[in-house]
Image (cartoon, coloured by chain):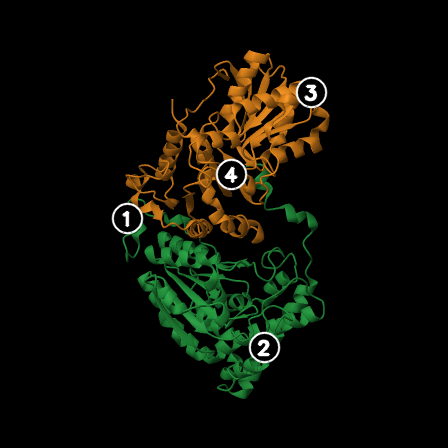
Chain colours: A green, B orange
Amino acid sequence: MNLLTPQRALPWQAGATAFPKQIAPAIGRPCPKSRFSASSGTERERLYATMTLIRRFEETLLDLFDRGELFGTTHCYIGQEANAAGVISHLGADDIIFSNHRCHGHFLAYQPSPELLMAEIMGRATGLVGGRGGSQHICHGNFYSNGIQGGIVPNAVGMALAEKVKGTGGIAVVFIGDGTFGEGVLYEALNMASLWSAPILVVAENNRWAQSTPIELELAGSMVDRGRAFGIESGEIDSTDADALYAHFGPIIEDVRREGRPRLEVIHTYRLCHHSKSDDHRPADEIDRYRAGDPLGLIQSRLDPEMAAQIEALSAEAVDRAVEWARRQPFPAPETAFSGHEAADKP
Amino acid sequence: MSTILAALNGALHEAMARDPRILLLGEDLLDPYGGAFKVSKGLSTAFPDRVLTCPISEAGFTGIAAGMAMRGLRPVVEIMFGDFLMLAADQILNHISKYPWMYNGKAQVPIVIRTPMGGRRGYGPTHSQTIEKHFIGMPGLVVVAVNPFCDPGDLLRTAIEDDRAVLFIENKALYARAVQAADAAGRLKDLYVRKTPDPYPTVSLSYNDFTEADATIVAYGGMAELAVEAAHRLLMEDELSCELVIPSRINPLDTAPIAHSLRRSGRLIVCEEGTATGGFGSEVVARIVTEEMALLKAPPARVAALDFPIANTSTLEQAVLPQVEDIVAAVRHAAADGRLQSTAPRHARSGDMR
C-alpha cells in the first residue's frame, strides 16, 4: 500500500508494519472538549467564561507592561477571543494545537491555567517552559506555539500525519493569520497535507492587519481560493460571535476527524488592540467601527446581566490570583540555562 | 569490501526493518530511481508505506518530518543536494534545533537530515558546495560527517537512534569509495589506527604507532582521504611523519584528540572542503590557540576552498577546491616553522572575490 494513494483513511496501517500501540503517548493531557462539556452553566456562559478569562488576562498583561513589571514583548488577542473559544472547545485529548506568536488566547482555551502562562511571561522557573519561551514559545500537553510565521504549519501537518500513523484518531489544528499567507512554506505544507490526507484544520484568523500593514497591501486574491487550489476543502466565516463560531466549527472538526482530510477555514475577525505594545497606527474610526462587534459585548448582551457579571468577576479573580502567584515564583537559576543540551556534549 | 554508498543503504534497510517508527522523506526516493545518489535505493520497494517521495519543498517536508518526530516517529530526511539545505534553514534554525531546549524538555525532535555535500564532480556553483559550516555552532543541532575510516552504516544507525536532531553530511565523492576499517590489530595497511569510544568516533591515524609526529592534520568528511594521501607523500618525499585526526562529529566538536596529537607534533593543519572564511578550520584553530597555545610550535594553518564559487569546468573547479598539493604545501610550510614563504597555503593569498 503506497502512502500516496489519495483519499485513503489510514494508509500506514494497511501494511505489515502497523504502528506499535505502545508508542502512542499515554501521558495525561488536557481535554478541552470534556472540560467544556463538564463545566457548569449553559454553553453560552461557558464560552463567555473562556473569553472573559482571555480578555482579562490580556488586559492585565498590558497593564503589567505599562507598570514595568514585564519585559520583552507580547501580542494580545483582544477582539479575537471568540475564535479560540469557538474552535478549541471542540478538541479532544488526542488533538493537537499549534499556535503562533499571538497564542495566549489559544492556550487559555486549551488549558485555563492563567498562572502557568503568567509565570512564563514573567520569566519564572515554574512557568510553562521554565521562562525559556516567554509569550510566544510555549508547550503544554498537546499545545505548541512558535514565533515564526509559516514554519509552524508543516510542523503541524507532520504532527497530524503522526497521529494518523499511530491511529490515535487525533487531529491537528494550526492557527495562522492573514500575514502568514505571505510565507511560501505555507503552500508547501498545504500541498503535502492534501497529497497525503493529513487530518489537519488550518484556522486562518484574518484580523485584517499584519502588524502595521493592512490586508489590502499584503494579500492579493482570496485566502479561501488558495486552499481550494490544493484540493483542500476551504470555507470562511465573517463573525466575532462566539455562539456562531462554536456552532460553525463543531461539524468542521468532526469532518476533518472522520474523513482524515485537511481543511482550511478563514475567520474574518478584528484585533481590537495593538499588534504588540503601543504600536497601533490604525485609523481610529476603523477601530471604533469594529468595536461594535466586540465578541464579549455580543455574548454579554445575550446573558442574564447578573450571570455575566458573576462570570466576569470569576475571570478577574482567576487572573488576579495568577498574577499574585506568578510574582512569588522564582526566576530560574542562571546555571539552569545549560541543562537540556548536556547530551550534546556526550552522545 | 563495502562501498560507503552500500554501507549507508544497508544501514537504512536494516534500521527500517527493525524500527517501524522510521519513515523516509525526500525528493525522488521511489524505485527504480531510488534517490539522486541511490542511498535510498530499494527502500520504497521494501517499505512502500514508509517512504514518502516529496514535492520539491525542502522547507515543507523537513518541517513535516520535524512534526512527525515531535509526535513519536523517527523520520529520516534526504535533501537531494547539500546546497538545498538553505531552503530548509529556517526549519533547522528556528524550529528543529530550538524546540527541545525552548520547550524546557517537553518535546524532542529525533530527526536525521541526510545530505550529499561537496564538489569534484563537475556539478557547478549550486550543486557542489560544502556548507555545513553554516550549521556549526547552532545550539541543539548535532552535525556528523561521514568519512571512509569509520563505518558510515554505524554512524547512520547512531544518528537514527539519537534523540537529538542530527545533520548528517555525506561527501558525494565518497559514495563509490571503500569503507576502510582497521584490522583486529588496529592496523590499516601501513597506518596505526586509534578510535575514540564515542558513538560518533574520532579516528586518529599514525605511521609509527603514535610515538612521534612532525604535524597533525585534522580533516573530516571528504577531505580525510586527501589528507591521508598528502601524509603518505610527505612521508615518502620529505620524511615528515604526519598524524591524522578525523572527527566524525564536527558539532559539537571534541578537540581532545587534536590536542593529544599536538603534544607530539606541535604543528596543526586543518582541512575542509568548504570556503575558509568563518569555517570549520577557523573554529578549530581558534579553540586550539585559546585553549592549547602552549602545544603549538608553528602558526596553525587552514587548507580550504578559496572564497569563490565552484565552477562547472574542471580546471576552475580544481583551482578553487583544496587539493592534496595544498595539504602537502601547508605541512611543509609548518614543518619549516613558517620559513618557506613560497609554499604558503593558497588560501593565504586568495584575496577577496571581486
Q: Looking at the image, tell me whether mark 2 or mark 1 is earlier in sequence order.
A: 1
As drawn, A213 above or below B325: below
Amino acid at the residue labelled 1: Asn
Same chain assignment for discs 3 and 1? no
Label 4: how many Cα within 10 Å (few below 14, some 14–19, many 20+): some
Q: Which residue is mark 4?
A: B309
Q: Which residue is mark 1?
A: A2
Looking at the rendered image, the disc whose residue lies closer to the viewer, 4 or 2, is 4
Cα–Cα gap, marks 4 and 2: 65 Å
Q: Are marks 4 and 2 in contact (CB under 8 Å)?
A: no
A82 and B305: which is toward the camera: B305
Amino acid at the residue labelled 3: Arg
Residue B48 position in % (x across, y down) = 29, 44
Cα–Cα gap, marks 3 and 4: 31 Å
Residue A267 position in % (x across, y down) = 44, 72
As drawn, B227 above or below A75: above
